[in-house]
Amino acid sequence: MFPFQEFLQHQGQQQTRRVFLGRASQGVGALALASLLRPGVISAAATVGRDRWPGVVNPPHFPARAKRVIWLTMAGGPSHLETFDPKPKLAAMHGQPMPESFTKGKQIAQLQGQKLTCFGPQAKFKRFGATGAEISELFPHIGSVLDRICLIRSMTSEAINHDPAHMFMNTGSQIAGRPSMGAWLTYGLGSEAEELPGFVVLTSLGRGGQNQPIAARQWAAGFLPSRFQGVHLRGKGDPVLYLGNPPGVTRDGQHRVIETVNSLNARHDAVVDDPEIATRIAQYEMAFQMQASVPELMDISKEPATVLEQYGCKSGDGSFASNCLLARRLAERGVRFIQLYHKDWDHHGGVKQGIEFKAQEIDRACMALITDLEQRDMLRDTLIVWAGEFGRTPMSQGDGRDHHNAGFSIWMAGGGIRPGIVYGVTDELGYSAVENPIDVHDLHATMLRTLGIEHTRLAVKFQGLDARLTGIAGNVIPGILA
Amino acid sequence: MPSPRIILKSCLRPLRLAVVGWALWKMAVPAFAAPRVDFNREVRPILSDNCFACHGPDSQKVKGKLRLDLRANAIAPAKSGKPAIVAGKPDQSELVRRLETSDPDDQMPPPESHKTLTPVQRELLTRWIREGAEYQGHWAYQPPVRPSAPAGPAAIDFLIRQHLKATGLRPAPEADRRTLARRLKFDLLGLPARPEEVEAFVNDPAPDAYERLVERFLASPHYGERMAIGWLDVVRFADTIGYHSDTPRNIWPYRDYVIQAFNRNKPFDVFTREQLAGDLLPGAGQEQKVGSAFNRLLLTTEEGGAQSKDYEARYLTDRVRAVGAVWMGQTIGCAQCHDHKFDPIGTRDFYAMGAFFADVKEAIIGRREDGMLVPDEEQAKELARRREGLTTLEKRFEGPMPEMNAAYDSWQRDLTAALASDERWTRLAPETAESAGGATLKIRDDRSVLASGKNPDVDTYTLRFRRGTNSSPVQLAGLRIEALPDDALPSKGPGRADNGNFVLTEVVARIERDGAESRPVHFMVARATHEQTTLAENNPYKAWTAASAIDGDSKGSSPGWAILPQVGKPQQLLLGTDGTSGWQPGEVLVGQLQQRHGNGHHTLGRFRIAMTTDSTAVTSPIALPPAPELAEVLRFPVDQRNDEQRRRLVTAFRSSTPLLEDLRNRIEVARNSLSGYEAALPHCLVTERGDPRTVRVLPRGNWMVETGDVMEPALPVKLSEGYRKPTGRLTRLDLAEWLVARDNPLTSRVVMNRLWKQFFGIGLSKVLDDLGAQGETPIHQPVLDWLACEFRESGWDVKHMVRTIVLSETYRQSSTASREMLTRDPDNRELARQGRWRVEAELVRDLALTVSGRLVPSIGGPSALPYQPEGYWENLNFPQRTYAASAGGDQYRRGLYTWWQRSYVHPAMLAFDAPTREECAAERSRSNIPQQALVLLNDPSFVESARAFAVRILREAPPGTGKRLAWAWLQTLARSADAAELATLEHLLERQRSDYRADPAAAQAYLSNGTSVTPQDIDPAELAAWTDIARALLNLHETITRS
């Protein structure tokens, strides 16, 4: 099922063209056949490019400020109170009961029905950058590029458990089955990557042991066709599932099998004239290209030592830092949406130690990613988002904090985003966003705007409705746009 | 000649054939008088798509008091004073003016909606108004009427050809027999046709050859497997709970229930009742109850911090959406937050529908229960045998035993004496109980104290007992400490050490009076029911004696009273005083239990303090007091006890006397063997009825608002108009009855529309999960209505309907499309030919296993775990999981038995569009992506199949490269290869062979894929080269395509 007109249209165009061009032996099949006679030469550009999806937002609704997104998902729910939102009043009230006026009528997760006690920030804050904004001194590297960053302290979410909260952050809905943002974007804008998927996911673990599960639905295409789903590049084993040849099969040997398959498919196409066959041939060629291009992409060992040092990673260490470097490499290759998950932010207990671990794992790499992109003149059209699925309570849960969605911090940088500002304010105890609150739909709407998309117009008919990433809500936030 | 409408349709596909289509349109217009506009097919979709959001059924959203879904409202003056529609007079109709105007204030749809009507759509609306603006009820809500047509499969052909005649398309000729056989076997059994059966069919001269092939397939046990796939998608069957930890649950027997239901051709109305309400059916057996597992298929959570109100609301909406998807073909989910914008389903209908499921007994948050035992026939026999064995022993235990009379009498005497001795003690109720080490001490109703929480190695319990001011003074002769077992303690206690032991180092007591100096209680004698003698090498007493608890030495870690191995039962420590301690009213007796063993948490878990004023109570033989329920009986004179009381005593005697130890042991063994056997049997979550939860309308779907109206179960008001509802609180069974009621217009159409897709690749109405206003009015509505009537009137006979469809000539058409047909009807909506598509994910796997000869075709059982890339589950947690692929035959089961891990569905399945089954999926997309190539080329399951196929080729085919290649081709595709095809393969074979000859290690490595053993008598290079031939064949588009 292709539940929307644009896709049908694309298919239809291809099909129609083929009908008028005549039999397949004069088309793609002939190319494949020719390559069988000249081994090693498959004309990738002519065939793979042919199936390239141009995107439905073409031309863009607005001039695009950003061409691609790197989303750094801090999975588990980072505490804003130890990272980006200083609360001296909370420190002063440490150990005292949380005033009910702050919490009444709000969702509470594991602390429901318990005595709520103020828990002062477990990290010291320090001023950074030209604006002198205060962030935790555990993040000096991020502090050093704070002037490139738009820090948002008034983020909110509707969800308060990990799984639905990730779904909400990624798809704008807490019900499974909706496309995640990367899928929407590759559907809307297509991808510039020749030999890579347009939507790529990388994951890394923290060493604090609070690694919450992440479901593959977080990068699913939902009701969009599977070609728009995120592809998880793995740190161990085949970076893409089933990418490696069977043991004992050489690249040449594999190539010959693929050539044979394509040539036999092309012959069959000449008999039955089925447009799916041309696509099938193109996909086999794409798969073969990926078998070489993905390992090449993943191999960061040839990066200059200075670069590895800048990020603080070693080839093959599977770290968040390595993934940041890979994100830059993916961005260079035209991938539209790159999403990194770094886990272990779920600090129900031991938030002090937990945040220190996290800071060591991400601080330098975040800075390096921003600087590296800037040096390559790519920061201006790359939109970076740093966000968890929610924040954490100002109230204690032992020596940690519970899930919290009424106000927390995220940051953005790059394409189309106003740098060097702090946007939004939470109340004096860091419970609720009280000034310029932003919800998830607003965030999505604003991101789409920087990418040249009017969020109400990127819609697909699903279950009788014009389904959108932003549902029936979402307002672009002009205050954070450059 | 083509009718204008058809040409119009192709014009409506933007950009497709723009030039040619337009030219045809221009030519066509003058040539034909346009037929009347069809409201349902042509007008309603335009209004629904562009207008109903603000001028439709959602009562909260109607703008300008105008509703365009109701004619009466549309022709009445709206807020502006002007009627939107004046029948017959487009130029006076406000609607037309608003469509044509360029004034942004008046323009409709408003500019901010980003919706615009095409000139063709505007023209249609204008014509429709000119023709009288007649409305029709939405087609799917009108009861289907059987169109006049010949009986049987011919009806389908008759109705379709009637329509084709109008369009000028001619039906395609019948497909060749090889294609027919292959198509039929994929469609009915999900398996590739074997060359022998194709050949037999091709050569069968009988006029009913095709009919017999159909019957043979319909009778196959694999028919149920094939039919189950679509059903399991739409009901979202999966092996795991879905949310967060996505842990397993016991549910696979439901999958087998579905397979068997199709195989036994269970009428669809029965199938419906059993799934929604199997537990409520009179005389419900195992099968009906397993069917009711349908209500448990939804996503659930075990996430800490999940709030039950939140998830209660999620479960309700999930179940309502499911009924909407499975039976009603309605996108009911919209009504969770607001009245449906397009269809007659209100928010109240939504929650009233949810209330049907409020009685499903379940934990809202947390692990699912094991579920019902589901033995198969053999297992049921064995289960009965074991149960009977146990019953026989238990009966003997409970039966008459005259030989025990003497022993019983003596036991009863002892017990009476023990009771008398116990009654010399008074149990003291502590005023406070404190732990110095931070343990939580809870005083219970029976005056015992239970320790929990922090579990220190060293602790001192301090208990305070106040002598009531109204009571008399007493002289303390002794204190008693009962150490009591409890299920909450490790090894049942009485201590908190892992083995249930404790060490009571020292007992100290004193009597306090306000304003006076406290007076110590001096203990002279200590006795205990049991003293531990083991592990006492370093103990100065060489035993853990009672006396050491009053030796005045509370410093050392070793001496003290302990009880190993007599843990898990009550023990007593009796302490006799020197007789000098008077306890006056108002005074407080303070007891301290010092426990200083210092490691392994050797503290008391549960205990009770009593006192006596009778010094003989301390010195007479210690007997443990009878349990309270026995004590109660023993206090009655023997001749006044009733039967129940006597039975209680007898049971207690038989449970404790050493004379019956052997019988008791045998019962224990039989019981363990039964429970062990039961635990290993299949279980299945089923529906059990509980007290219904309160269901409220949640305003805008917000579960935190608890002010909405309380809803009782009710059918959707508009959709069930005219249906005679039962009285009283409606049940899930009433819901099921309505769904399969004669006058329900939806169910039979929804099911037939889905079935049609299985045989033609696309539904008659193409949006399978939405037959509402936003769905598609079927081009061949008479066909769908005929099928719906036939289905219902046949007694909901599914096989009959399958047979009817596949016997039709329409089904038997060739799928090869002429260029004209591809141009005019690219998506085959007119059905002037058959469809052609890549088979479903499960079938891709089945195909490779079948051709390779490795398929293990057994039906049903626990889900299987095909090879899966290592680390694919690394992002699962709570707990972390490693994947252990099935061993032996289970590795080669059909695709539909694949373990369905919702958050990480097997990647080979996912690549070929298997849904995650988190939501009901009425249909699958059919993508064509590079991951499919990677799976077919590199997944060990497919590589191993290729090697097994290669072994078959070398063993079973006639010798000689050419013959072998031809044979292999035939096995894969059930057709002969032509010379060019064979040459292409031979070319590959030669080059691969020479490579593998040059690199024997590579050949060996290639052959070691998978777990099955490679024959040693075949030259590895040869086998490796043939494996590549097999791999190429299994990768062909034609191989995985049903045409």
Image (spheres, coloured by chain):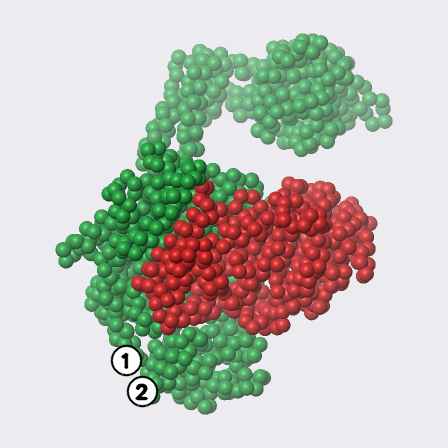
Q: Quadrant of residue A424?
A: bottom right
Front position in the image: A149 or B87:
A149
* Circle 1/circle 2 CB separation < 8 Å: yes
- Provide the residue designation for mark 1: B1
Q: Provide the secondary structure element on which disc 1 rests.
A: loop
> In this image, B143 relative to B929: left or right?
left
Q: Residues within 10 Å of mark 1 (few under 14, many from 20)?
A: few
Do discs 1 and 2 belong to a common subunit? yes
Of mark 1 and mark 2, the one earlier in the sequence is 1
Chain A pictured colour? red
* Chain letter, green: B
Front position in the image: B1014 or B767:
B1014
Report, in whole angstroms, how far the alpha carbon at label 1 lies from the one at label 2.
10 Å
Image point (72%, 54%), residue name: A367
Q: Residue B885 carries which label?
A: none
- Provide the residue designation for mark 2: B31
What amino acid is labelled 2 in the image? Ala
Image point (34%, 50%), residue name: B987
Q: In this view, does A353 lie above or below B132?
A: above
Image x and y of residue B32, in percent: 31, 85
